Image: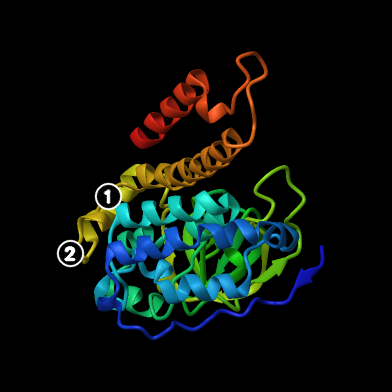
């Protein structure tokens, strides 16, 4: 496969984090709906959202919603993140997929790494796709550092990523092998592969594969367990967390379910928006012929959908 040039990562806008509240961040996301709808064709053609959209997201603080405040983030919580993703998905589900799976793993990072490492990781916008399947091999050097080689597929959010997290099979400096470890890589460690955009749906979600060729991974970026799958390991890491916010102490599997759920609810809201427009122009097919928005059956179905979406 051919590789494509590294996407430019926009620098943080520089606006003080304290100036952004939960309501203002969500409002910014809701205000983008019409624009995201208009950009859907271009987003699909490019298999990712644009650099201009990335800058808008950065300026709006979307990438900092879950980052600890003491490291320059907003720390606005899970509800704010979910509502932001839902609002974006209402305009473009693929854009929301790329945004969500790029920005949501600040929670995992806050759970797993100590404060010194977090301070290093969270400088600037934090965009970090995370995959589950161990697909590479990571070799420990005599000095304790690591070299990573392998290809990782379906890295949603990678086009503008600052980091990448996944799992690899280790070979320790004494030659011994062990169960998969969790590693964190920095932008510049990988090459992005031009292999995304030929799917049935979500083809513009920026889910390219990436490859590593002997990339240098610091030892403090390697965790001796496959965190994210092993719940016992997750609880152990939770006990070691230095953060003050309860969201950095939780078990991550529940959070992994909320990510696609928020995208799905937002996408269905977008579908209902489109349905509402159709009821204003389409008529019933049986007498009495009238606009569907004036027909009791169609209004009942529409109301039922609104109720279910509100519950979701």
Please tell me how crowded label 1 is: few (under 14), some (14-19), or many (20+) other residues with Cα within 10 Å.
some
Residue 244 numbered mark, or none: 2
Residue 217 location, x and y as percent? 52, 74
Outermost residue on the left side: it is 244
Q: Earlier in the sequence, mark 2 or mark 1?
A: 2
Residue 307 numbered mark, or none: none
Check disc 1 and report its element: helix, strand or loop.
loop
Hey, which quadrant is residue 114 in on the image?
bottom left
Count how many numbered circles sit on residues in the image. Answer: 2
**Residues under numbered marks 2 and 1 in contact, where contact means CB atoms less than 8 Å apart:** no
Outermost residue on the bottom side: it is 14
Nearest the viewer among 178 and 293 is: 293
Q: The C terminus is located in which quarter? A: top left
Residue 258 location, x and y as percent? 40, 44
Hey, which quadrant is residue 223 in on the image?
bottom left
Outermost residue on the right side: it is 1
Q: Is residue 156 visible?
A: no
- What residue does disc 1 label? 250
Hey, which quadrant is residue 106 in on the image?
bottom left
Residue 188 higher or lower than 200, as above or below: below
Residue 260 location, x and y as percent? 48, 44
Q: Write the residue at 52% across / 30% down.
A: 293
Q: Is residue 45 visible?
A: yes
What is the distance, in whole Å, between disc 2 and disc 1 at their CAs? 12 Å
Nearest the viewer among 292 and 143 is: 292
Q: Write the residue at 42% across / 28% down.
A: 303
């Amino acid at each position: 496969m051919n590789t494509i040039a590294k996407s430019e990562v926009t620098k943080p806008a520089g606006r003080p984090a304290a100036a952004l509240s939960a309501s203002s961040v969500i409002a910014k996301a809701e205000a983008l709906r019409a624009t995201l709808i208009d950009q859907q064709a271009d987003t699909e053609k490019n298999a990712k959202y644009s650099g201009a959209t990335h800058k808008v997201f950065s300026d709006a603080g979307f990438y900092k919603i879950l980052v600890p405040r003491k490291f320059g983030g907003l720390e606005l919580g899970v509800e704010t993140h979910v509502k932001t993703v839902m609002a974006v998905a209402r305009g473009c589900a693929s854009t929301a997929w790329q945004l969500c799976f790029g920005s949501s793993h600040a929670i995992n990072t806050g759970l797993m790494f100590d404060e010194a490492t977090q301070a290093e990781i969270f400088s600037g916008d934090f965009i970090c796709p995370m995959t589950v399947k161990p697909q590479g091999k990571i070799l420990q050097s005599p000095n304790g550092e690591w070299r990573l080689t392998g290809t990782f597929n379906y890295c949603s959010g990678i086009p503008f990523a600052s980091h990448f997290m996944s799992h690899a099979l280790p070979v320790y400096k004494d030659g011994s092998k062990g169960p998969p470890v969790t590693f964190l890589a920095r932008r510049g460690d990988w090459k992005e592969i031009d292999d995304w955009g030929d799917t049935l749906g979500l083809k513009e979600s920026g889910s390219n594969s990436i490859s590593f060729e002997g990339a240098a991974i610091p030892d403090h970026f390697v965790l001796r367990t496959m965190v994210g799958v092993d719940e016992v390991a997750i609880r152990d890491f939770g006990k070691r967390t230095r953060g003050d916010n309860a969201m950095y102490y939780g078990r991550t599997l529940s959070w992994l379910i909320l990510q696609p759920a928020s995208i799905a609810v937002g996408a269905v809201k977008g579908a209902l928006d489109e349905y509402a427009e159709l009821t204003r122009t389409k008529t019933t097919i049986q007498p009495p012929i009238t606009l569907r928005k004036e027909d009791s059956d169609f209004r009942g179905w529409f109301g039922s959908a609104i109720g279910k979406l509100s519950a979701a």
